Image: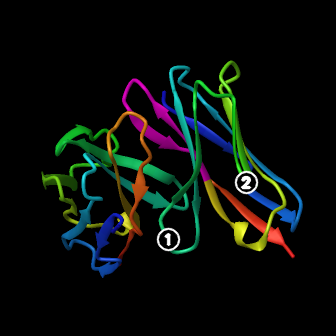
Amino acid sequence: GENVEQHPSTLSVQEGDSAVIKCTYSDSASNYFPWYKQELGKGPQLIIDIRSNVGEKKDQRIAVTLNKTAKHFSLHITETQPEDSAVYFCAARYSSASKIIFGSGTRLSIRP
Amino acid sequence: DAGVIQSPRHEVTEMGQEVTLRCKPISGHNSLFWYRQTMMRGLELLIYFNNNVPIDDSGMPEDRFSAKMPNASFSTLKIQPSEPRDSAVYFCASSLQISGNTIYFGEGSWLTVV
């Protein structure tokens, strides 16, 4: 069935270090993979996305990689800062149903 | 530009009461999604519409839940009768089209059923 698995569920890193969050998806026909950041009391906000015709995309300190063969994609945050503390969600669009399914989320904490 | 607007932001209601959550999507967007967020189940897609037509309601938990989109600028999610296990944050989101474009979330409606 449609499924997106996300790991880890919690992640604590020292300020300035890198953070990596990994996701796997089940539908090999999925072609769109967004990442969302959710701060306390707010709705998820898109921070970066990648389409299946691209293997990597970068935006300042944030990068995403996609391995279509293995059906997994990752979010990399470098030089982490306190404001990076939030819950991060990966997602995949299932082409058969054209709906976006979310992973279970990763609570990222940046230690000062 | 105004984002997705949801109301109410917070609601506390007694078990058995009817709850109506409202959503105004971003102007020009033709796809609308209702999600529910809980600690146990994360972000679940309940239903989505394209051009005001429900496309997939397989995520609606049971018959107590219903959603409508009478026009391009308004949607409702109704729970009748409400139960304590319905307590969650309900998000509405919209996008320009179903196929791949970014979906934008509202700030959510925090529902507590006591």
Q: Residues within 10 Å of mark 2 (few under 14, many from 20)?
A: few
Is A61 magenta? The answer is no
Q: Which residue is rendered at x = 59% and y = 51% of the image?
A: A89
Q: Which residue is mark 2?
A: A60
What main secondary structure does the magenta stretch of the protein show? strand
Amino acid, disc 1: Lys
Q: From the viewer's perspective, tell me whether residue A86 is left or right of residue B78.
A: right
Q: Name the quarter where the C terminus of chain B is drawn.
A: bottom left
- Say which quarter of the image contains residue A17: bottom right
Task: Find residue A60 and report its horizontal and vertical position in percent.
Answer: 73, 54
Horizontal side, residue B105 vs residue A53: left or right: left
Check the image and report above or below for A80 versus A73. Answer: below
Q: Which residues are magenta?
A: A89-102
In the visual, does A24 lie left or right of B92?
right
Indicate which disc, 2 or 1, sits on the residue closer to the N terminus.
1
Q: Nearer the viewer, residue A111 or B110?
A: A111
